[in-house]
Amino acid sequence: MRLNKIYLALTLILFTLEALIAIYLKTGFIRHTVGDFLCVILLYCFFKSFIVGHHFKIAIAVLAIAFIVEFLQLTNYLELFNLENNQLANLILGSSFSVSDLIAYTLGIITVLIFEYKIYKLWIT
C-alpha cells in the first residue's frame, strides 16, 4: 500500500461532483444515470489511491461491489439494519433496483479500463 496523489485528487474531485449532483439535482438523467456512471469511477480512484495493483483486477472488484449493492436493493436490506429512514444510507446504498444502474456501472468501468489502457500505452511509448 502506498498513497497515489493523482488518484486521491481524482477521488476528491469526483466526490465533490457527486455531492453537487446529489444536492442540486433531485431527478433526471444526470442524477440517476451519470451519477451511477461516476460512482464506480469514484470508487475505482479511491481504491487506486491506496492499493497498488493491476487496474483490471481493481476495476472488476469495484464493478462486483456495485453489482452486489444494486442486487441487494431487491431485498429489504436497509430495513434489516434499521436504515430505511436514513437519508444518507438511502442516498449511498440506494433503495430500488434498476437494470439501467447496472448498465451505468458497467459503462463506467469500461471507461476506466479504456483510460487506464491509454495511459499505460503512453508510458510505454
Image (tube, helix red, strand yellow):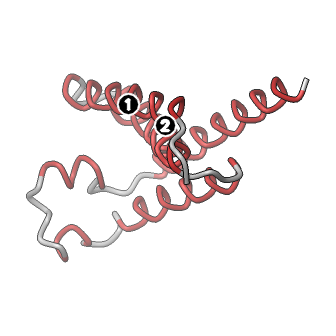
Which amino acid type corresponds to the residue marked 1 in the rendered image?
Leu
Tell me whether the residue at label 1 lies in contact with that at label 2, contact meaning CB atoms closer than 8 angstroms: no
Residue 18 locus on image (x, y percent): 33, 31
Residue 42 screen position, x and y as percent: 46, 39
Foreground pick, 20 / 79: 20
Residue at point 45% right, 28% down? 9
Q: Residues within 10 Å of mark 1 (few under 14, many from 20)?
A: some
Q: Amino acid at mark 2?
A: Phe
Q: Which residue is mark 1?
A: 12
Cα–Cα gap, marks 1 and 2? 16 Å
Circle on res. 37: 2
Where is residue 69 shown, x and y percent of the image?
40, 61
Nearer to us in this view, 121 or 21: 121
Q: Is residue 116 left or right of residue 41?
A: right
Observer-side mark, 1 or 2, equals 1
Which image quadrant: the C terminus? top right
Which residue occupies the foreground of this view, 60 or 45?
Answer: 45
Residue 4 position in % (x across, y down): 54, 38
Quadrant of the rendering where the N terminus is positioned: bottom right
Label of residue 44 in the image: none
Q: Residues within 10 Å of mark 2 (few under 14, many from 20)?
A: many
